[in-house]
Image (cartoon, rainbow, N blue to C red):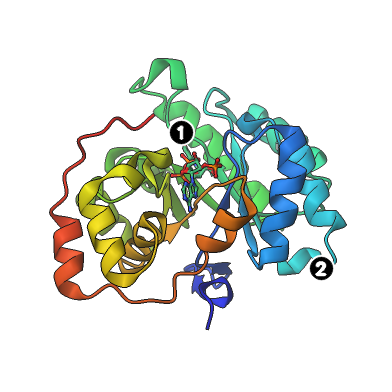
Amino acid sequence: MSILNEIYTLYNGINIPKLGFGTWQISNTAAYEAVSVALKTGYRHIDTARAYGNEENVGRAVRDSKLKREEVFVTSKLPAEIKGFKEAHASFEKTIRNLGFDYLDLFLIHAPWPWNDKGRDCTEGNIASWKAMEELYREGKIRAIGVSNFSITDINSIIENCEIIPMVNQIALYIGHIQNALTDYCRRQNILVEAYSPLATGGALKREAIREVAKKYNVSPAQVCIRYLLQKELLPLPKSTHANRIAENADVGFIIREDDIEILDSIRQDFRHF
Ligand SMILES: NC(=O)c1ccc[n+]([C@@H]2O[C@H](COP(=O)([O-])OP(=O)(O)OC[C@H]3O[C@@H](n4cnc5c(N)ncnc54)[C@H](OP(=O)(O)O)[C@@H]3O)[C@@H](O)[C@H]2O)c1
C-alpha cells in the first residue's frame, strides 16, 4: 500500500494521512500549481500557515480538485506573533476565509514566541490563544488542535491551565536532529509528532552518509530522509515545487534495515538549518 493511503489516528479519533505536503516558501501564485500537483499525485494532507501568505491558493487548489472536502486533510496555523483570545478567534476567521472552507482539519499555534523574539515567555498569550482554539474545536469549526515549535515546558503550561491536551506538536525533525526527549514526552501525552523540514530544507540531501545509505536501496537521499522518519512513527511534511520530486517523496515503500537506521541515528547535524 502506498504511504499516501496510510493514516495515523489522533487521540480524539481523527484520522490524519501519514505523509503531508509542505507549502512554506511557496508563493501564493505558485501554491495553486504545487498543491494541485500534490493532490493529483495522491497526497491528501496539506500543511499551510497564515504566515506563508498562500492560504488563498492552497484553498482554491483543494476546492478546484475533484476531491470532496472531507477527502483532504488541511492544516493551518495561528501566526507566531498573534497571541490572545480575541486575536486568535479573529485570525482563525481570516484563515478560514482565505481558504474558502467551512471548517479546518487542524489548527496549530505556529510558535510559542514571535519569530523575531525567540524564547520570549508568552505563556499567558499562548494559554489565551489555546482557550480560543478549544472553543473553535468544541463548536466543530476545527477537527483537531495542536501546537508547533513547543518545548516540554510550553506544552506543560497548556496542559496545566487548559482543558484539552494538544493533539499534535509540529517540530523540526530530520536525520541528525531528532529531538528524542521532546518526541518521547509527546508520545507519553498521546500527542502526534509531525516532522517539519524533513529534508532539513534541502540541507540533509548533500550528506555523504545519507547518500551512501540511499545508494544501497537504490533510492534518493530525500526518500531515505522521509522513510527514516516514518519508521520512527513520525509524520513528515516534505515540500517541493517540482512534480517529479513531489512523486519521489511519496514513493517510500522500501524498508531501511535496522543496521542502516543505526548509521543514520549516529549522524550529527553539522549543517545549518534555516
Ligand atoms: N511549523 C513550522 O514552524 C515550520 C517551519 C518550517 C517548515 N514547516 C513545514 O514543513 C514543510 C517542509 O519543510 P521545509 O519547507 O523547510 O523543507 P524540506 O521539505 O525539508 O525541504 C525542501 C527543500 O528540499 C528540496 N527538495 C524537496 N524534495 C526533493 C527531492 N526529492 N530531491 C531534491 N530536492 C528536494 C526542495 O526544493 P524544490 O521545492 O525546488 O523541489 C526544497 O528546497 C514546510 O513547507 C512547512 O509546511 C513548518
Percent from the top left, x then y, of residue 27? Answer: 68, 32
Depth-wise, is mark 1 or mark 2 nearer the camera? 2
Q: Dot 1 surroundings within 10 Å: few (below 14), some, or many (20 or more)?
A: many
Q: Upstream in the sequence, badge 1 or badge 2? A: 2
Label placed on residue 233: none
At mark 2, the secondary structure is loop
Q: Position of residue 227 (x, y in %)?
A: 37, 65
Viewer-closest of 31 and 142? 31
Question: Which residue lies at the image location 66% right of the left edge and 68% below the top edge?
Answer: 42
Q: Say what amino acid the circle numbered 1 marks.
A: Ala
Reading the image, the residue beneath label 1 is 111
Identify the residue shown where x is 42% and y is 31%: 112
- Residue behind label 1 places its C-beta within 8 angstroms of ligand 1: yes
Estimate how packed mark 2 is, as few (under 14), some (14 to 19) or many (20 or more) residues with alpha carbons within 10 Å. few
Q: What residue appears at the point 26 percent right and 54 percent down from the top-left corner?
A: 210
Q: Tell me the element at label 1.
A: loop
Q: Which residue is mark 2?
A: 68
Which quarter of the picture shows residue 228?
bottom left
Query: Residue at 61% across / 30% down in the picture?
Result: 51
Q: Quadrant of residue 86?
A: top right
